[in-house]
Amino acid sequence: VREFGTRGSGEGQLENPRGLAFTGEGELAVADAGNDRVQVLGEDGTFVRSIGSYGTGEGMFNNPWDVCVCGDGRIAVADNVNSRVQVFEGLGGFLRSIGSFGDGPGQFRNVDGVGFGAGGEILAADWEGPKGAVHVFSGEGGIVQT
């Protein structure tokens, strides 16, 4: 058993880490909720890169709760308080934002889980929405099923 990371806001430091996902290169993506970012760490825990910062704009987070990596390298992040899922290319470049606040199809109250389907679909869990729903979006972000 080993552990890495210390509490804080510096590179490689974590504050309220949540979701974890390995990339195809063996790096670990961590939803660093307390620092409003995703950190990518090497297998030994060394800092590789950071994605995002606090805010509401593209590529910015407010309490990122979960992270998932698709087989093609895309990274999806459950941006909890901003009520959306954000999708990035593997090195962290912003691709798209999916969803908004509300109770309708493709809208979230509290998105807290994210994953990729076998066909590249993006799945997002909303525990606080009226149905406690899992939303399914195409890889391009269009709603497929709620």
Image: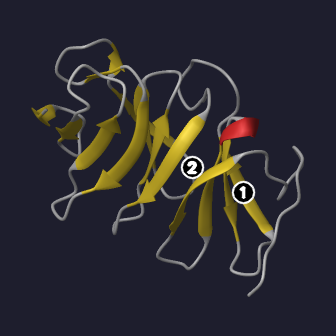
Image disc number at residue 5: none
Q: How is the image coloured?
A: secondary structure
Q: Which residue corresponds to mark 2?
A: 92
Q: In screen coordinates, is 130 left or right of 16? A: left
Expressed as whole percent of the image width and height from the top left, the position of residue 63 reads 62, 32
Q: Is residue 65 above or below residue 18?
A: above
Q: Is residue 113 left or right of residue 42?
A: left
Marks 2 and 1 close (CB-CB < 8 Å): yes
Residue 111 drawn at (x, y percent): 40, 32
Quarter of the figure with the C terminus: top left
Between the C-alphas of marks 2 and 1, the distance is 8 Å
Q: Secondary structure at mark 2?
A: loop
Q: Nearer the viewer, residue 97 or 104?
A: 104
> Is residue 83 shown left or right of residue 40?
left
Farthest residue in the left direction?
Answer: 145
Amino acid found under the numbered disc labelled 1: Arg
Q: Circle 1 is placed at which residue position?
A: 49
Q: Is residue 124 left or right of residue 54?
A: left
**Could you say which quadrant of the image residue 125 lies in?**
top left
Q: Amino acid at mark 2?
A: Gly
Residue visible at 81% across and 71% down in the picture: 4
Q: Specify which label sits upstream in the sequence, 2 or 1.
A: 1
Helix, strand, or loop for circle 1?
strand
Disc 1: CA contacts within 10 A as few (<14), some (14-19) or many (>=20): some
Instruction: Please rate how many residues cluster around mark 2, counting C-alpha atoms within 10 Å: few if below 14, some from 14 to 19, many from 20.
Output: some
121 to 128, vertically: above or below: below
**Relative to 95, residue 116 above or below:** below
